[in-house]
Amino acid sequence: MCPLFELSLETPARVLKLHTPAELTQRLCALGLRPGREVTVLRRGWLGGPLQLRIGSTELMLRREHARAIEVETLPVREG
Amino acid sequence: MQRIALVGMPNTGKSTLFNRITGGNARVANWPGLTVDLATHRVLLGAKMVQMIDLPGIYDLSGGAEDERIAQSFLANTALTGVIVLLNATQLDRQLGLALQLKALGAPMVVALNMADEARSAGITVDTAALGQKLGCPVLLISAKRGDGIADLKQALIDLTSRNQQVNLDFTCLRAAAAFHDEEAHLHHHHVSRPPTMPASITARIDRWILHPALGLPLFVLTMFVLFQLTFAIGTPLQDALGSGIDWIKSSWLEPALAGAPEIVRGALLDGLYDGVGTVLTFAPLIFLFFSLMAVIEDSGYFARAAFMMDGLMARLGLDGRGFVMLMMGFGCNVPALMGTRVIRDPKARRLTMLTIPFALCSARLQIFLFLCAALFTPAQAPWVLLGLYLASIVIALGTAWLLRKRFTSSEPFALELPPFRLPLFKQIRLRGWGETRAFLRTASTMIVAGVLLVWFLTHYPNEHHSYAAMVADVLEPVLTPIGIHSEMSIALIFGFVAKEVVLGALSVITGVQGNALSAHLASSMDPVSAISFMLFTLIYVPCVATVATMHKESKSAWFTAGSVAWSLGLAWVLCFVFYQGTRLIGGWF
């Protein structure tokens, strides 16, 4: 279990819990970032910039402060 | 009349579908939530005329964001024949919930799954028949962009209208989106199949370059530079041709026709009104080109990437990545950049961005600076002066945001979608260019014509040698002398309120000389320090009436607009005072 922010790049993980502000949580759920879903960090922006995430076929950017408030657990890397 | 509303999440191609069905001209872009005022259009469906309404993109019917509230109150307060629920076929894992939410409210629906072409190439298949059975409404795969499935969609809408029922949705029994997550997952699991691993997309490969920590920013700046260059390379000859056409009509038709009219009527009509309208018209080709090219970049999905790249830096200044993109647009022209801030959905965050844009050194100001730099500095010095002005422009714009960030704190939940790269459609680009040009002509014409008429009046009355403008310049003298701007130049600054494009023309009218003679005259009447002070003032004070008019139209607040104008005027004076007196003081020591 670790914050989404600390996840290594290209490592699939399962979303456990969102401790983000209520409105952002609702938005993130609508974008597919909800407990139980699989998330991958594609890249971290420079100069303390946001994270580029992939959930299913949706890609989105999320600021680091918010990525720190999301708990995930890493999944074994699938072959293929 | 029967009404059908179009509902969907941002970035599902809602505006494209709306244009496709209505042949209308709603804006479309690869940003979340661009459609602003509700676009409506009448469509003939079968034998009935139906009103179509394009609602703002929403993530969730129970959401609290401004767009979501707009959509809720529209749906709750309008009798509807039905709703088109537009979902992105590649993202059904998170979008089906919206259809379920609407179904629970009892809305008569047609569910359209857009981007069927993208879904197909990603290997995603949808069992539309089974899904339709579960949702209790027609489910159709379409591609709004390519026009696939539109005929079937129209037929489904005709079936809907033939029931002749109107319903009011009861939002008191609305359930939160989270309540539908399990059902959504269930439907997705059973009726949508996707390959276990997604093929490495082209988008990912392009991202590797465009979002590169070191190459990303230079690539973006280069792209914007090419865009400006193209706009002016193609647009300036068009502008000149249009200008000479307008002059020709004036000299060969209008002047003879009005030869008998009294001086004041002729002057006001020809030099005021006609020249004013002419000036506005000559901008039309530039605006059209600028927006068409901008639409290519915007619809491709590049802007969202640029926003991603700059967000880290911009967040520290109270802005977000989109503000940077708008500021870059402002270097071409402040007017479209102000219009572009619509993508920022939080009113406060949007206003903070709007306050920074007038400081972006636009191409009209660049003309003045190029002329003055060439007149007063050596070829070796000139580029540095120009570079300094660009840096000042960026520092002042970002500094303004930083100073005011506490008053304009965004409450927007900030998570932007990064859509895959898509090839823009020629038709969309043309529609966008034309739509923006029309909007510009409508807003700018009234303000510019009023401004031009005013300047004409001020410089011609009571008489040309002792005009009101000269009197104003005399009044302003005690204010402008401390910053090194003498009366001749201050009249030019008054003209600059109308448009920076007319400043050089005004200078040649005031001094009575043109071209090289004007350069020589300016070089003898100003020293480098006062020239820089003049340019600094020109950079910072109000860009032009078109910008002020746009600011007013977009913010819908006279106070905000007045505040922005006062801030730029005050800042211009203070900074020029510090620069001019400071340089004089330091110069005195040596």
Image (tube, grey):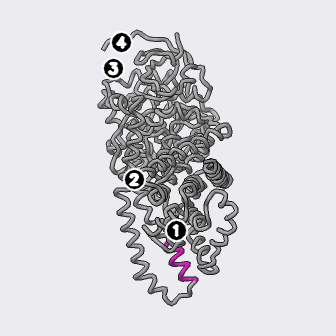
| Pointer 1 residue | B507
Q: Are marks 1 and 3 on the same chain?
A: yes
Identified at 37% across, 43% down, the residue is B144
* Circle nearer the viewer, 4 or 2: 4
Q: CA distance from mark 1 to mark 4?
A: 71 Å
Residues in magenta, as a range: B264-276
| Pointer 4 residue | A78
Residue B156 x %, y %: 40, 43
Report in which chain the residue with disc 1 lies: B
Q: CA distance from mark 3 to mark 2?
A: 44 Å
For the question of whether residue B389 can be seen, the reply is yes
Amino acid type of the residue that numbered disc 4 sits on in the rendered structure = Arg
Q: Where on the picture, by quarter, is residue B168? A: top right
Q: CA distance from mark 1 to mark 3?
A: 66 Å
Amino acid type of the residue that numbered disc 1 sits on in the rendered structure = Leu
| Pointer 3 residue | B197
Q: Is residue B579 left or right of residue B375?
A: right
Q: Secondary structure at mark 3?
A: loop
